[in-house]
Amino acid sequence: MTQNDQEFLEYVVKALVDHPEDVKVDRKVDEMGVLLSLRVNPQDMGQVVGRQGATAKAIRSLLRIVGVKNNARVNLKIEEPEGSTRAPRPAREENV
């Protein structure tokens, strides 16, 4: 299986953030599909999530399209960075 989804996510997120050197994407494949875990600089979290999660939702929609083209189910997990100013929410993985 190709890693187009990981490369695509890195490309999009690096274009959005102020600290592209801090963007890290881990890729795991299991029976549920592909899980991409995204870590960014704490100062860039707002740019990745967007207002009311709009940017994150758009990124997930694009990843769904990349997944369909590669016959894979792609899930995105945005890791809460240390030092983030957002209140922590219960951990849950979102399906794309």
Image: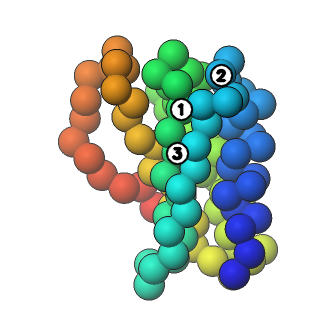
Q: What is the C-alpha distance between the residues marked 1 and 2?
A: 8 Å
Q: Is residue 62 visible?
A: no
Tag 1 residue: 40
Question: In terms of sequence position, does the residue under pointer 1 or pointer 2 come before the other?
Answer: 2
Q: What is the C-alpha distance between the residues marked 1 and 3?
A: 7 Å
Give percent across and percent down for residue 41: 52, 25
Residues at marks 3 and 2 touching, judged by CB atoms closer than 8 Å? no
Q: Residue at x 30, y 52 (%)?
A: 92
Kindly identify which numbered label has been placed on residue 63.
none
Q: Residue at x 77, y 43 (%)?
A: 11
Tag 2 residue: 19
Quadrant of the image occupied by residue 93: bottom left
Question: In terms of sequence position, does the residue under pointer 3 or pointer 2 come before the other?
Answer: 2
Q: Circle 3 — which element?
A: strand
Q: Residues within 10 Å of mark 2 (few under 14, many from 20)?
A: some
Kindly identify which numbered label has been placed on residue 38.
3
Residue type at tag 1: Val
Q: How is the image coloured?
A: rainbow
How many dots with numbers? 3
Residue type at tag 3: Leu
Residue in front for this viewpoint, 41 or 89: 41
Residues at marks 1 and 2 touching, judged by CB atoms closer than 8 Å? yes
Q: Is residue 25 above or below residue 1?
A: above
Give percent across and percent down for residue 9: 68, 49
Quadrant of the image occupied by residue 32: bottom left
Residues at marks 1 and 3 touching, judged by CB atoms closer than 8 Å? yes
Q: What is the C-alpha distance between the residues marked 3 and 2?
A: 14 Å
Q: Circle 1 — which element?
A: loop
